[in-house]
Each structure stands twice: as C-alpha cells, then as structure tokens.
Amino acid sequence: MGDNSFLHFLGGNIMEFLSYTGFANVEIGNLIMILVGFFFMWLAVSKEFEPMLLIPIGFGILLGNIPFKDAGLEIGIYEEGSVLNILYDGVARGWYPPLIFLGIGAMTDFSSIIANPKLMLVGAAAQFGIFAAYAIALALGFDPNQAASIGIIGGADGPTAILLSSKLAPNLMGAIAISAYSYMALVPVLQPPVMRALTTHKERTIKMKAPRVVSQTEKIIFPIVGVLLTCFIVPTGLPLLGMLFLGNLLKESGVTRRLAETAKGPMIDIVTILLGTMVGASTQAKYFLTADSILIFAIGAFSFIIATASGVCFVKIFNLFLKEENKINPLIGNAGVSAVPHSARISQKLGLEYDPSNYLLMHAMGPNVAGVIGSAVAAGVLLGFLI
C-alpha cells in the first residue's frame, strides 16, 4: 500500500512537472516567432547585417517565446517583479534610449556639418518619411498617438522609436522597435535600388569639393549651441538631444577623454545588449502576432523608402540653385536617415561603383549625423503635439 502511495505521489509530481514544460504549453505562434528569431540571428551571422543589434534581438525573441505555464512563477517579461520585467523597465519607461544617445554623441564627429552646414538640410529633408508614414497610419485607422509612433520608423532610429512609442503607444512598442531595427539592418538592401532609380549616371559621378578643416574650438562650441538651439525649439526632445550633445562635448572637450571612452565603449555596449535582448523578448506571440504588427511592418518599409527618396530628391532640387563647383552628389541624400554610419557607407559604396576615385563618405556623414538630430527633433515635435 505504501509503495502504491509513493508511486502515485511520484507520478503526480512527474505529471505536474511536465505540465510546466514548454512542450506542454507551446502554441503555433511561439514556433513562428522562434523561427523569426533564428532568421534575425542568421542575418547577423551570415550576412553581417547589424550583428550587434540583431543577435541580441534574435536571441531575445527566443527568450520571449519559450512557453511556460502561467502560474505566478515570475519569469515572463510581462510579469510584475520578474527579473526580465525589471530589465524591460528600461525599454518601457524609455531610459535605455538616452543612454544609447550619450554613447552615439561620444563617438560622433560633427565636423562634416560644421564645415558644410547646408548638408543639415539634406538630413532634415529625409525626415519627411516620418510624417508621410504618420499620415498613412492615420488613414489606416491608427489613433494619432499610435500613428506618430509608427511614423518614427522612417527615421531608421531604433532608440528614438522606442522612446516615442513608450510614451505614446506602449502596446505597439515591440512591433515598432523590431520594425525600426529590422530596416536599420536592411539599409544595404533597401536603399541602393531607390538611389539608382532616382539618379542619372552624371549625377552619381558628381565630385564634391573637399570640406574645410574644422577647428577644435568649433567642435567644442557646436554641442553647446546645438543643445540650446534644438531644445529651446523642441523641449520635448531634451532626453535624447541633451544626452547626444553631452556625449559629443565629452569627446570634443579634450579633458574628459575617460568619460567619453566609457560612454562610447563599455556603457553603450552594455545598454545595447540589454535594449536589444529586452526588445526581442517583448515579442511574445500572443502580443506580437497581430494584424496591427503586419501593418506596422508594411508602413515602416514604406516610410523608410520615402525617407531615402526624399533625401535624394531634395539634393537634386537643391542642386538647381547651386553653382557647378558647389553641387552635391545626390547619392549622399540617402544618408539623411539616421542609421549611422551604415547609410553613409552605402553612399560611399555606390559612389565608388560609378567612379572609383569618388569618395563620398566624409560628405555623406554630414546628412547622416544631421539625420540623428533630425529624427530626435521630429520625435520631440510629435510628443509636443500629442502629449
């Protein structure tokens, strides 16, 4: 009798254990998302598309879609008090993105736009994709807050997309963040066809004159003037713009080298790991696999293409008013999106393809870093409208 009771007790424990396993709780949506995670990691490893982002995001998707029995175990990312939920707080409350911007500022050289300020206009023109996507999202039935969060995907700026959606549309943040980072990674695929379609061979071979040498004093003054000017105009952009320009001042001042090295090295690496993994883990199938997510991806792709086209077309129009020696190669127009420095490298690659002696990277970095500022300003404008 005692043996039977023990066997019954043991059998009950085994069945209870099995009921908690992922195999007992798996749904088709979990498997689909796990395949998506595999795909992201394959893109990172095999194609080297944004590996420092896509590997944490892809692995995070696996973590977020390992099924478990909802029994108050406090292991899921959406369970209050769980370890993953605490780490996710940096995404949900939007304090990872400003730390990312601090690191970006510490590694960014603004010399190209200081030397040639009109390149800032190219970066500004590319932000048209944000507002075009905003209008499309509104037309498709999203409310203004959701539409604004979706529109920011066109800036190809993951941290800005996360910060804005955390304030305006937290229920869509996973889809918006994944979409923004996906299109950042797909810059080498999405931009070149648009750039080729909108330019002639003659335009692609325009050689721009070398930029002037920028003094160290100008580099120090720029972030101070930059933060005052942009944040007085758009105070709602303060978390991102303030940290961006602080990071740049740490770099350029010459007396805080250790702080700058920390900001652009260990700190941004740690935050990138946490941000990417938590964004990936937030894509639990039951929250992520919706019709809205599919629409967000479609609108995001369209806005990214519009942003690229806007930058290129703006340069073509701008050239009509410039002297021959001051003309801008339209191939740098794509760099107005803030995927730094990847979109600038695409400008360089295509420029060399049509003229092996035409080096566009330094010129393309102007609209590229202007795009970082522009997307943060755009986010601040949308926050100002809607909060």
Image (cartoon, rainbow, N blue to C red):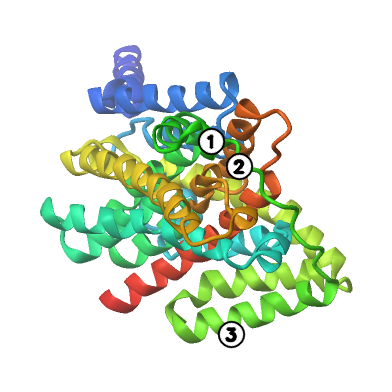
Q: Residue at x 24, y 22 (%)?
A: 28
Q: Which residue is mark 1?
A: 202
Say if mark 1 contacts mark 2, CB within 8 Å. Answer: yes
347 is higher (above) or lower (below) than 371: above
Residue 387 shown left or right of residue 210 in the figure: left
**In the foreground, 228 or 285:** 228
Q: Secondary structure at mark 2?
A: loop
User: What whole-number distance in Å separates the C-alpha atoms at marks 1 and 2?
Assistant: 7 Å
User: What whole-number distance in Å separates the C-alpha atoms at marks 1 and 3?
Assistant: 40 Å
Residue 29 shown left or right of residue 237 in the figure: left
Foreground disc of the pair 1, 3: 1
Q: Secondary structure at mark 3?
A: helix
Of the image marks 1 and 3, the number of the one nearer the N terminus:
1
Identify the amino acid type marked 2: Ile
Q: Which residue is mark 2?
A: 206
Residue 47: give x, y in percent of width and height.
Answer: 56, 22
